[in-house]
Image: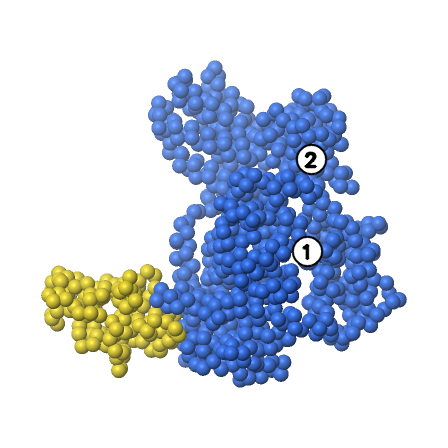
Chain colours: A blue, B yellow
Amino acid sequence: MDDLLADFVAESREMLEAIGGEIVAWEAEPGDRARLDAIFRFVHTVKGNCGFFDFPRLEKLSHAAEGALAEVRAERRTPDSRLVNAVLAIIDRITLMVDAIEAGEELPEGGDDFLIAALEPDTSDTGETVAMQAATTQARSTGGNNAAPRTIRLPVELLDRVMSGVSDMVLARNDLARRLREAGAEPTLDGPFERLNGILNDVREAVTKMRMQRIEMLYNALPRLVRDLSAELGKQVMIDLDGGDVELDREMIEMMRDPMTHIIRNAIDHGIESPADRLQSGKREIGLLSISARQSGNRITITVSDDGAGLDCAKIGQKAVAAGLLSDTELAAMPDDQVFELIFEPGLSTAEEVSSVSGRGVGMDVVRANIERVGGSITVTSNKGEGTQFHLQIPLTLSIISALTVSAGGQRFAIPQSYVEEIVHGGARAIEFSQVGETRLMTFRERRTPCISLAHALGLGANEVGQKQKLVLLRLGPSQLFAVAVDTIHDQEDLVVKPLAPAVMQTGIYAGTTLLDDGHPVLMLDVPTLAQRNGLNAEARTRATVPNANGNKSEADKTRKVMTFTGFDGRRKAIGMELVVRIDQVAAEAVDRSESGDKVVVGDTIYTLLGLEPGCKLGETVRLLRLSDSQSELSYAVAELEESVDLVEAIKPTPEEPGLEGVVLHGGQPLRVIDGFALFARHACQPVQLDRPSCRIPGDDDWASRMLQPLIQAAGYRIAGEDEEGADIVIAMDSHAETAASDAAACIRLYSDPDEAARKGDGVYRYDRTGLVDALRRARQEKVA
Amino acid sequence: MSALYVVFEVDGRLAAFDAADVQSVIEIEDIYPVPQSPAWVAGLTAMRSQSLTVIDCRLALELPAAETPGERAPVVKVDGHQYAIMVDAVDDVLEARSDVLPVPGGFGAGWKRIGKGMIETERGPVLLVDIDALIAGPCAKAA
């Protein structure tokens, strides 16, 4: 909203500046049609924009001026000096109001009617007009000192040039730093160089921010896309966008546009069912597609979730077998979440019928490739009948990549940090090497992982994988891991990556080049292509992991994965990882504490909240573990979240403490393991869907549908249909107040006259925004309670 | 004619780039090879904290590699990428004494692909090189 408002102010300003000259010229020659048109366009645009915002006075003024000018244009009126004066006075007043809007002040009081009256042809008192003009001019000179524009528009290419200039400066700085180091201490240079260094870092940060755009830029096109697609497919889909103020690199936004569009197409086409099917399975006719963005560190997480049918595990499996991606036995051994990941494999499309919307099998594999190309990752989770969630993780910016520098075959290379899972020394005792055919395998943490020698892959040496080398474990997909053997690992650093010449790009195994601080050019490896070139394609990766999951089952049984945390009672606890479906963070206000049991609102759902101690203090936000037994969900508040660990020690049962499975020794300290079974046995219940309360507004009233509706929706209501009965709240206009429906729980009366509203005391003046919002909020709270 | 040309020597012959296309002439210090890249891409090198792609002119012409590569290399910019062109020796910057002329009798196999024509200079006739074609390498011949 603030952005839109700033745009409005900026646009009005620009136009005011542009027509400044026209106004003067028109004053000198009122008959000039071109000038008249320019001024007419201005007041018309202002009027149009005002309809968008809540500026009734501005709208009224511009409407009046537009009306008078339209008369002149239609040659029903001649522009006499009085009319010119009146129009100019109105334009001055508009300028004044725009200033006030920008400064966030109240609009200057009164006098509007007077200005509007002055436009009327029958106004005879010219003296008053002049006085009025004097008054506005005076007001303007007091308030108009901040008239300098706050923003300027710049071509994007210019920004890019500045950005690349700054990147080059950083590299030149690094070069200079190296030479200074080599030359030895030089106090007369070190001081100024440090200063330059500091300034450059500031500039670089500022320029990076300049390139940042709100993810809203990506969001803006989505409602229309969803509307068009759902209309085409005969479905009803509502879109909910969250986190639009998250900022990321403009280039990254462009890179995300296609993958996002594709995921949304898929969600609407395959995910969300037809209205009839939805009703049958007890859902609301309208499907919900929610997209949220969050920033964590230097990465952005975008979640696209729908409340559709969910992924069909069996169907995906069948398709995968049919497409020859894996065998029946392998499929049988595969856990569901790994089956879901198969949708990212080339050659899978789960739709029964191929529609025009989401094509034929080309799709999710391309989406994944594109996201990985920019250093991101994508995963999917799904519950049958409840919906599907895609989680996209992308870096903030494309041009600076955090990377690991390594040496192989006497040369240095950079590996994007986003792929790096772990680094292990080949000599470590936990590692075993073996060779099957030409493929080298290494066994680490009971997982057999294919291993390639980087030097060999690049043609720089023999396929030696051994104990002298360091192994970098790289993660391609959620379950696809491979190791790259290198000679030395140098450092992890943030690199400014530059594109490579086409002749070098042709090789496909490099993603870019960069200069290290010591002035050496270094090639950045393109990990997915590297894996593919070395036979680590989807098939090989799947095969490599599945027998493992199978063969080590008995061993896996011995260990249990748990999530450890500190509870609000200050004790270290753990809960079985299989129960934890997600981690939420909510504002403290979302927690409702009461004797009968705590509740928490996450999104649109109320969960039973466990884990709070009576009287314990909450911070601004509360971290929650969302637990699920696959039927119902609970929320568990934790004071501090730790990590997921594998428990090897036996759990010592503690029958004297109900709710605890037992205590286990971990890291030398006792860890209390919560009994998930008991937890759900006691507290399991379906989360309550928080229905948006409905609100009925007078249907035949233009003002209501134009002005009131957005306000009410923003307050968390949905607008009740014309013939829907029993709305939660009814808004009645004063003219129809008596006919207000009695079936509603609450009724808010609106009066068009503030005095009348004050006199009657049972309603709100219709432009009293705060009053109205308060009344709506009160009604809503009563309902929830 | 007052157009200037950077004249250099490859395999005993004189060739030239339009001086307007040449940003500078540098002395290549270290070349960092790019594994798996085409043969005529000698590697990367750093110039004033920028990285350049080094093109071996002889290999791009499918000539045998030089025994001792020349020390100086002209730097050109094509499509936003900077290249250092390894030649046997950078000769001089000369003024052309003629328009670009067709060569009587043609250039011969490797040269034909990169030759734009011939110019007369005070050092005699010089082959004018099409930089784009040179950088595209022998593969582009098929296309």
> Percent from the top left, x then y, of residue A262?
51, 51
Residue in the picture at 29% in, 75% down: B27
Quarter of the image containing the C terminus of chain A? top right
On screen, A717 above or below A605? above
User: Does residue A750 show up?
Assistant: no
A39 to the left or right of A48: left
Give how far apart the Cα atoms at labels 2 and 1 are. Answer: 28 Å
- Find disc 2 in the rendering and name its residue: A694
Determine which quarter of the picture holds residue A554: bottom right
State which chain disc 1 sits on. A
Return the residue nearer the eye: A269 or A766: A269
Return the residue nearer the eye: B45 or A676: A676
Secondary structure under the numbered disc 2 in the rendered image? strand
Amino acid of disc 2: Ser
State which chain disc 2 sits on. A
Circle on res. B64: none
Residue in the picture at 62% in, 74% down: A447
- Find disc 1 in the rendering and name its residue: A585
On screen, A647 above or below A659? below
Q: Say few, some or many: other residues with alpha carbon within 10 Å of mark 1 (under 14 / 14 to 19 / 20 or more).
A: few
> Percent from the top left, x then y, of residue A330?
61, 66
